[in-house]
Amino acid sequence: MDQVPILSIITPVFNGEKYIEETINSVLAAKTTFPFEYIVLNDGSTDTTLSIIKKFKNKIILESHDNIGESRTVNRGIDLAKGIYVLIVNADDPLLTEDLINIGIKEISRDESIAAVYPDWKIINNFGDTLKLNILPDYTDEIMIGKCRTLPGPGTIFRKDVADTVGGRQHKWRYVGDYDFWLRISRKGKIVRIPLVLAQWRCHKNSTSISQRNVEMAKERIAVIEEFLKDFPVSKKLRKNALGNAYYMAARLSFFDSKVPGKEFMIAAIRNGGGIPSETKLSVLVFILLLPISGLIIKMIPKKVIYRLGGNKW
């Protein structure tokens, strides 16, 4: 840790007492061939998170501030970072292996035009058991922009100077800030996949992507693509695919929140995309077309079943 760091690892945390110690230990235990610094930012936690973090104060860089939200906290971490590269390790997603760092740094440093590298990753439960392997495709604009699919996920390493150039994460996005960030990063350099399972993401009911699938998230899914297309013009075909799939992904959140105007968004998806969006699933389309009857049926299903049905399928 006394060497000039090549990599800055950032963990933002708010009320993460359940997993933060496991995550910090996983990073500190990593045997890497590259020097790194570890920045842990307490975002105004009201539980025992801060007292847990303080146990590691001699081994990490600790910053604690009033609650300002994840995006602003991540940006503070990027501002503090001294490394050439940055890796964000979420408070409930412990580092799976040091191979992520050793392989990732070699890959991103081989070509200055590479802005970020991302691995395949696995989904784990509360106890760390593997639920699913998430084997991703190689990056293309057609997938990340046209299909509105966030390819860089857990374990993504990116260049700090590129993050600075795009201004970090935009604070206005509460639910899709990471997707917007990667979209803008993609205009500044290559995004390259590492075809190995090197990271993990913990699926639990309090995860933002699980617990807050609501009308506000739906609107953001549309707004982030509309703003991106305004700032960064693309081909007519790619634009149609992006808008169609953005509205479709917003529409499917009606499965979780009755306030989401599913039919309205689905019609907009077809209109903007010039037909049924490429990512449309028949089961989701039928559900949307049968609203509000299908919504009433969903209300009779226990929430734990809804979470299981939802997962990453919706």
Image (cartoon, helix red, strand yellow):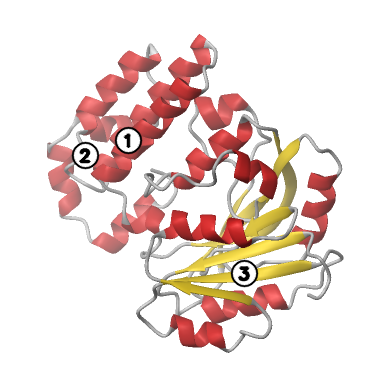
Residue receiving disc 2: 260
Do tag 1 and tag 2 residues touch (Cβ < 8 Å)? yes
User: Disc 3 versus disc 1: distance between alpha carbons?
Assistant: 34 Å
Mark 1 neighbour class, 10 Å CA radius: few under 14, some 14 to 19, many 20 or more: many
Numbered tag placed on residue 39 in the rendering: 3
Residue 13: % across, % down: 47, 69
Q: Is mark 2 on a helix, strand or loop?
A: loop
N-terminal of the pair, mark 3 or mark 1, is 3
Residue of label 1 = 250
Residue at 45% from the left image edge and 56% from the top image edge: 72
Please state which amino acid type lies under the numbered disc 3: Ile
Please state, as top left, top right, bottom left or bottom right, where the C terminus lies in the image.
top left
Instruction: Give me the residue at 54% from left, 82% from top.
Output: 53
Judging depth in this view, the residue of 173 and 145 nearest the camera is 173
- The one nearer the camera, 232 or 146, is 232
Q: Residue at x 39, y 26 (%)?
A: 226
In the image, is 16 to the left or to the right of 215?
right
Please give the label number shown on residue 141: none
Front-most of 165 and 49? 165
Residue 278 in sight from this viewpoint: no
User: For the residues marked 3 and 2, what is the alpha-carbon distance in whole angstroms?
Assistant: 38 Å
